Image (cartoon, grey):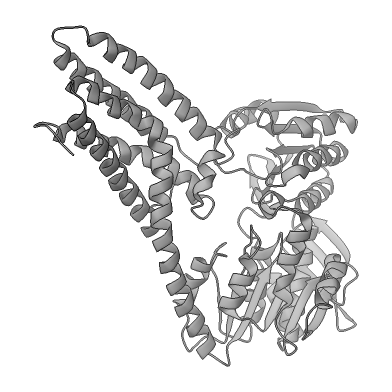
Amino acid sequence: MTLLRGDWFYVLIVALDAFFMTRPYLYVIQQDNYRVSEIFKSRRLAFVYIFDICAVSVFTAIWLAFYFFSSRAFWGFATVLFFFIAEFAMYFMEDIPKRKKPLKYTKRAVRCLLFVTAFTTAAVTCSFGIATARLEQNYLRYIVLFCFPLAYPVLFCVGASVINVFERLNNARYARRASKILSKRRNLIKIAITGSYGKTSVKNFLKAMLEKKYNVLATPASYNTPMGIVKAVNSLDETYDVFIAEFGARRVGDIRTLMNMVKPSLSILTGINSQHLETFGSEKNIAREKCRILEVGERGLCVVNSKVKDKAEFALEKLKKRPAVIYAGEMGDVCARDIVMSEDGSDFKLVISGKEYPVTTPLIGRQNIENIALAAAMAHALGVEMPFILEAIEELEPVLHRMQLLRGEGILIIDDSFNSNPDGAACALDTLSMFPRRKVVLTPGLVELGGKEREENYKLGMKMAEVADLALLVGIKRTDPIRRGLLDGGFAGEIHIYDSLDGAREDFKCRLLAGDALLILNDLPDIYDDIRK
């Protein structure tokens, strides 16, 4: 490898550009647990790459034209300099727009950013040095620098894949340590919660009920990955009696990994539907993976949503050691009856152990009441007395962005922006239908449903046609099935389609009236590139 005097300048600008080029790629893979293959699914990165191709084509043509000039050394240098300035400007601007889920500079993200930058710089520097040594005309070696953006996706994949190996080994070490900590606490009550929806709500409701009797530690917010659980376990000390872990799963094997790590004796299955069908591959895989939460042993206990009783029984029949099972929800051993909802909350009768208890809660939505029944079934099984359970239910607060009731400027807002599954969407629309107001729905549709996505969004449109008076759709292509469902469902109201969420918000002043009820149904993160922020 040979470098000429002054080539340090090219190394410096390559490193600077590589740093800024890495960030949008890192943002994409961070959204799916650092899976490198995600960069090839991103429309935004595809758009950026097309710009790279255009920039390379234009500047390479200029560079080749200067080859015939006597002062080509100067003009070649100037062309390369302006080329990298253009690249830097594009990638710098790419990181400026506000994102709903911005790149989080965690320790892992910083390590990946620095490593990929260093790896990319080293690869380009070596290639530049080899070209310098082998090409008779030094002017021609600049082709390496022009090819750098074109080769960057490959360089990123290699660099990110290499560091991912070390990250996985490091994560496995932390997971083993957390598993040992949990195993040593033999008297610790360990509860696992999973399902296609409702996990965080059930976790929060159960925590509130159990705290009437126990000292409880639960995984915070939506921390439901191995590393999220590790962070929670780091806070576990001898004073805690109960540990509640939310289990997330997007692929086959995720629940098994978490079960082996936590080894719970109690579990709750909140429900099963086609959420994450795209990554699971089939509905059968989803059901099989979610039902692994039932593998708690014959001395364990599982609370299961009665809606998935058939799937649960099918899975239980294959277990060598069947745990005790309580079905909760509609027609379950624990259920809610005589539900009455208003803008102030919900009233219903909670049926448990054959007795009925009148309940008042500030929460709205049948899915919230269903989640309360699941949590109450587990709390009652763990010895929390009914007066304390009822007291906890009365004190419950809505989980952020999950059927959260807000008021502003005369408009009633139902914030269900974290809801992205068919069952939850149907429940949210049922709740909206109960309010004697003009009903407005703002949604970008449902995602990650694989081959069923268009079908489910069409059904969503049909359901909206029964309830809504005004439909605000975000995303030109993704919402087309919703629009067709609305029209086929006989929707008589207005339909407005926006290419961005900001565009819809700016139009609120023209579309919303005092006294309206607005349902915000799902709020896609920026990773779904057909929604431009």
Q: Is residue 345 above or below residue 486?
A: below
Task: Report if residue 386 is visible in the image.
Answer: yes
Q: Where is the N terminus found, in terms of image quarters?
A: top left
| Figure disc tally | 0
Q: Nearer the viewer, residue 102 or 337?
A: 102
Residue at point 59%, 71% (across, down): 257
**Position of residue 313 in the picture relative to residue 473 (left or right):** right
Residue 270 seen in this snapshot: no
Q: Quadrant of residue 388?
A: bottom right
Residue ranking furthest to the bottom = 187
- Pick the front one: 361 or 462: 462
Nearer-the-camera pick, 59 or 304: 59
Q: Residue 213 at x, y = what percent?
A: 63, 87
Quarter of the rendering containing residue 350? bottom right
Front one among 479 and 495: 479
Q: Tell me what residue is drawn at x 58 percent, y 92 percent.
A: 187
User: Which residue appears at 73% of the width and 90% of the height?
Assistant: 299
Counting from the top left corner in percent of width and height, residue 46 is at 51, 31
Could you tell whether 394 is left or right of 137 in the image? right
- Point 61% across, 65% down: residue: 254
The picture places residue 447, in percent across and down from the top left corner, at 68, 44
Most extreme residue toward the left, as rendered? 5
Q: Is residue 350 left or right of residue 403?
A: right
| Residue lying furthest top | 69
Q: Position of residue 103 (x, y in %)?
A: 44, 47
